[in-house]
Image: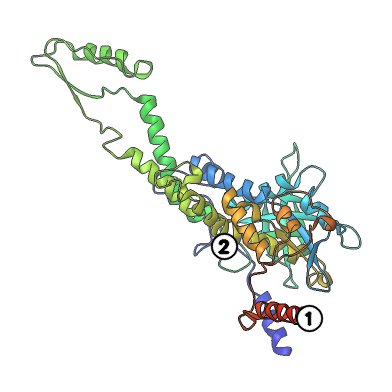
Amino acid sequence: MKMFEQLKMLFRSRDKPTNFTNSRLSFLFGSTPSGQKVNERTAMQSTGVYACVRILSESVASLPLHLYRYEDNGSKVKAREHPLYFLLHDEPNEEMTSFTFRETMMSHLLLYGNAYAQVIRNGRGDVLGMYPLMPNQVEVQRAKNNELIYVYTKTSDGSGREEKISLTRSEVLHIPGLGFDGLMGYSPIAMAKNAIGMALATEDYGARFFANGATPGGVLEHPGIVKDPERLRETWQAQFSKGNVHRVAVLEEGMKFHQLTIPPDQAQFLETRKFQLNEIARIFRVPPHMIGDLDRSSFNNIEQQSMEFVKYTLNPWLVRIEQAIHQSLFFKDEKDTYFVKFNVSGLLRGDYETRMNGYAVGRQNGWLSANDIRELEDMNHISDKEGGNQYLVNGNMLPLDQAGAFYKERIDADDRILELEEDK
């Protein structure tokens, strides 16, 4: 026990949690080799980043989130009587729905690598509400007793003065993303800012090309001597620059036009933009077809990709959120009895025919009742009188050592009946 306490103090006496790399300067913001400044806000101007963040945030926010209680027999039931059930499932505060709250928290997690919410408690410690905090205004520190504290920088309205508010561990719901110290997450935007910067640069290049695009752009070749080259240049620019883009050029006196700029298709401009879109999808582990890239998708594999999205992309985020809620919001003596769980069964359901075949197998083998199936299909239960909770089994399936036993009993019974009739 003494050794455990020593190890615990060693762990808790480390430097404060941080999202710095080798240098002491934050790497969340800054320029990239492409010349684009990438941060959490500019990154959202990229269609790929915006699409990935929106898909993941809305997917997590739309899933049902329930609070369960373990019964003595090991089964689980929804604990609707618990105060946290309403806060998590319906309204975490008076200003937000559960969907909006979870969507906001998930977007913070994807952009900043950390999501914070202030937890409002009463004198008994019961949770009364939760309000999201902007991650870039939260600094995680350690108090003198090595406990974590969260310092929130609040800007006063009008005056511009900053006020620092210290919150204890019990007053903050902190959901960290992938990190190096186990306490703070790193921003996916910061870790992949070069790829996102290149995507922004290609968009900027395309916009500038079409804005300035006097395509004709190059050299005019005259077979003789041009008497007034300045007038010719001004006339050309007046006809083909800015608002006069893509007008037909009429050349006189045997002049020839030689284009000097490289057309975007020859510079593989469109291919670069498409590759960067896939690169961003790879960062967030989102299937390309979900952000509009259908080149490698077909009718046969989209359903499989969607299920893989739930299992390998959504599920790790959901477990991360569930465990953070369980750690931060429940009392110590409640943690063995209560837990929260996202319901992803709706996303994992196949097409109608596949679901019906699966239900038939479960029904015939005795591990699904009619009400179990109706529950999965969001239908109302039927009464026990109508067989709603009965579990049936196929009568043809018998243990191997009993094979033929029923037939033998039937033959013996028929023989006894014949003997009785003969005696009469």
Quarter of the rendering containing residue 206: top left
Quarter of the rendering containing residue 237: top left
**Type of amino acid under label 2:** Leu
User: What is the number of the mark on residue 214?
Assistant: none
> Between 394 and 123, which is closer to the camera in this rendering?
394
Residue 281, x across and y down, in percent: 47, 50
> Between 423 and 238, which is closer to the camera in this rendering?
423
Instruction: Tell me what residue is drawn at x 78 percent, y 66 percent.
Output: 76
Whether residue 176 is visible here, answered yes or no, is no
* Rendered image coloring scheme: rainbow
Q: Are marks 2 and 1 in contact (CB under 8 Å)?
A: no
Side of 313 where 297 appears, left or right:
left
220 w.r.t. 365: above or below: above
The secondary structure type at the circle numbered 2 is loop
How dense is the environment of label 1, judged by Cα within 10 Å: few (below 14), some, or many (20 and up)?
few
**Type of amino acid under label 1:** Leu
Q: Most extreme residue toward the left, as rendered?
A: 224
Q: Quadrant of the N terminus?
A: bottom right
197 w.r.t. 182: above or below: above
Q: Most extreme residue toward the bottom, as rendered?
A: 2
Q: Quadrant of the C terminus?
A: bottom right
Instruction: Tell me what residue is drawn at x 76 percent, y 39 percent.
Output: 157
The secondary structure type at the circle numbered 1 is helix
> Between 201 and 94, which is closer to the camera in this rendering?
94
Residue at image mark 1: 420
Residue at image mark 2: 178
159 w.r.t. 92: above or below: above
Find the distance from the CA under tag 2 to the CA under tag 1.
82 Å
142 w.r.t. 50: above or below: below
Q: Marks 2 and 1: which is nearer the front?
A: 1
